[in-house]
Image: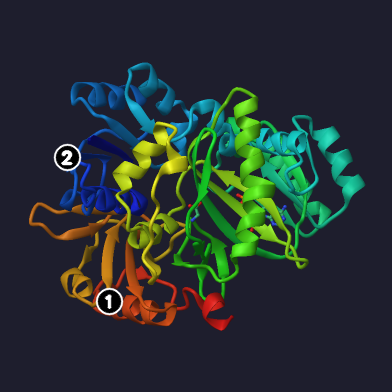
Amino acid sequence: MRILVVGGGGREHALCWALARSPSCTALYCAPGNAGTKACAESVGIPAEDIESLVDFAWQQAIDLVVIGPEAPLVAGLADRLEEAGIAAFGPSAAAARLEGSKAFMKDLCARHGIPTAAYGRFTDLEQARAYLYRQGAPIVVKADGLAAGKGVTVAMTLEEAEAALEDALISGRFGDAGGEVVIEELLEGEEVSFFALCDGTTARPLVSAQDHKRAHDGDKGPNTGGMGAYSPAPLMTEALQARVMSKIIEPTISGMADEGSPYQGVLYAGLMVTPEGEPRLLEYNVRFGDPECQILMLRLESDLAALLQATTEGRLAEAEIRWRAECAITVVLAARGYPGGYAKGETLHGLENAAAVEGVTLFHAGTSEAPDGAILSAGGRVLNVCALGTDLATARERAYKAIDCIDWPGGFCRRDIAWRALER
Ligand code: AMP
Ligand code: GLY
């Protein structure tokens, strides 16, 4: 198979790394990629949002499978355009990607199919939204309907905060079209956990559990980020809970989408709240792998990823083999100081070779670029994923931090407590 991976972050480096090891992959490209993907895939200078150029490239290069990493091109219909051109794509159609692209769509689907989630209302009119808000009271959650780069959710402790969020979205246009409609929903209490399943339109197969840390600083404090680290397995996700998530949430979603004419193909990433009674409830869907969760899933995957993704696109997931390493995995994100706010770019990272030489360690690049002299430069907020395998989580974590300590980059920072919840348990 000739394969094109779309995207340029740590998730895509990990996907390229796993595909490059797949016996069924004969040629591998990454658009646009980063300084790390170059080691396993040929870089293609096309941005992930440039749908027409990606389809042209895939056609000209006789690509057999396009693996779409980020949500934006999925929501914009890249999988549909490839399909029209006769090229297989791993990732949902635009219609199915509404599970992430429209929170109101996702909530309505849950309501139609009895999928447990927070009670909600959806509004385009400020006065109606306000009236609902006052009937419900605080605390409450306000969400922009569309894609808002992780900034569209306000967990409001007071009615004033909630009203400000409504006005931001509906009146000030802070999220553009994405905030033309809002969902107001009940605040759920409990412990958050992520869940990943491969879906081929009719069959869903769970992946091993993985959990990220969203806050920027130790102790899960500070601003929300795309994820500062992750670990697998997540002890909260027991076999019994996994079975409940599959039967109560994932399977009704897959059959509901198929029945309504938008079968879901790709990886489905559920953000869940596990209530104090141990019941899973759906917070959100993403229509892609989590970043950085994907990095550790790829480290633990033993099966041929290319064959597995092909089986997914061809509706053969029921018979596919999905084998995992027994070892635990962890990833720590090295980010530029200031992230998720403003930060500098173009700083040199030293010591990467020594870091990569630590036992059990693999480095995946996220926001990096390569200088003409071969130096690795920072080029984004999340810059590097330092990943490690170990017989247990404590060993994996020790190895990852040992590797981090080999890296010399005064402009970078990381959390020092990734996996603390799991290790405390
Ligand atoms: P989302 O993008 O919908 O996952 O929201 C981002 C974060 O907001 C989640 O990871 C939760 O921490 C929080 N959140 C979203 N919805 C709710 C809810 N209904 N109850 C409590 N917390 C929520
Ligand atoms: N790590 C969270 C995300 O990918 O959305």
Q: Is residue 260 above or below residue 176?
A: above
| Residue located at (40% from left, 27% from top) | 78
Observer-nearest of 48 and 257: 257
Is the residue at mark 2 in contact range of ligand 2, meaning its CB lies under 8 Å from it?
no
Question: Is the CB atom of the residue marked by disc 1 within 8 angstroms of ligand 2's nearest atom?
Answer: no
Residue at left offset 33%, top offset 17%: 85
Mark 2 crowd level (few <14, some 14–19, many ≥20, 10 Å Cα) = few
Question: For residue 65, which quarter of the picture?
Answer: top left
Q: Check the picture and name the quadrant holding the C terminus.
A: bottom right
Residue 401 shown left or right of residue 266 in the figure: left
Q: Residue at x 32, y 33 (%)?
A: 66
Alpha-carbon distance for marks 2 and 1?
32 Å
For residue 67, say whether it is visible. yes
Q: Position of residue 302 (x, y in %)?
A: 32, 58
Give, as a three-letter code, the residue at label 2: Thr
The N terminus: image quadrant: top left
Q: Label 1 belongs to which residue? A: 403
